[in-house]
Amino acid sequence: MSAEQEGSGTKKRRRKKEKNAVLIFIRDIAVMSIIAFILVYFFKPIVVKQTSMLPTLQQDNYLFLSKQAYNFGKPERGDIIVFPFYSRNGMDYYIKRVIGLPGDRIDIKEGTVYINGDPEDDHYTKDRTTPGDIRNLVVPKGELFVLGDNRLVSVDSRDPSIGTIKIDSVVGEAVFRLLPLGEAGPVK
């Protein structure tokens, strides 16, 4: 084999390697773009800033929300949702648990929440008592009645400035806790 032929073969191999590297780079960019699209379109990260969901969620827990949860399904009692709340200080996100669904009758008396006449299973609440007095509140169509798990400090549907939450306003359902790592896993 002459030096000229050997040089030509080396150039071809180099061009083939460069072409393969470019194709691999393009493939990697496409895969990363698809993953980024899925994450941005379907999930939203959020950090818990308050203590209204103790003991279920702690301050500084890092959560992922399913942004499409109610586009493909309906809210269920017990779901933990995030919704915007607008006050004179601006907009903030509130994290609460769904207690009442559209058409449910909610009563709160003597520290107990009643849903359609039956006492709520409040095993997940911090103090197992719910302050307030609500009688015969029927959750409107397309809305939810929500409470925090730390009901002694939670600002939620008991407060007239919040009231029931429109399902369409829900940013997402909390589905996964990432941090702290020791508590990572599905949110319940």
Image (cartoon, helix red, strand yellow):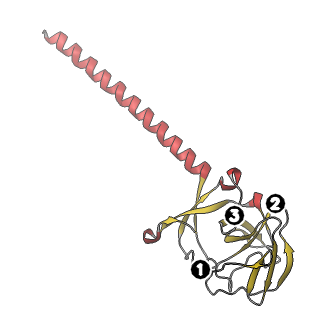
Viewer-nearest of discs 3 and 1: 3
Which kind of residue does numbered mark 3 sit on?
A: Glu
| CA distance for labels 2 and 1 | 27 Å
- Which quarter of the rendering shows the C terminus? bottom right
Residue matched to label 2: 142
From the viewer's perspective, is residue 180 above or below residue 35? below
Q: Check disc 1 and give the amino acid type.
A: Leu
Q: CA distance from mark 3 to mark 1?
A: 20 Å
x, y (%) of residue 128?
65, 86
- Residue at 17% x, 14% y is 6
Taking the view exactly as shown, the residue that stands out farthest to the front is 118
Q: Earlier in the sequence, mark 2 or mark 1?
A: 1
Image quarter where the N terminus lies is top left
* Residue under pointer 1: 54
Q: Nearer the viewer, residue 112 or 65?
A: 112
Look at mark 3 in the image and give the residue it sits on: 76
Question: Label 2 is placed on what type of residue?
Answer: Gly
Residue reaching furthest bottom?
110
Disc 3 crowd rating (10 Å Cα; few below 14, some 14-19, many 20+) is some
User: Which of the two discs, 2 and 3, labels the residue nearer the N terminus?
Assistant: 3
Instruction: In this rendered view, identify the residue nearer to me: 4 or 27.
Output: 27
Q: Assign a secondary structure to mark 2.
A: loop
In this rendering, position of residue 66 left or right of residue 83: left
Q: Considering depth in this image, is 170 or 84 the residue closer to the camera? A: 170
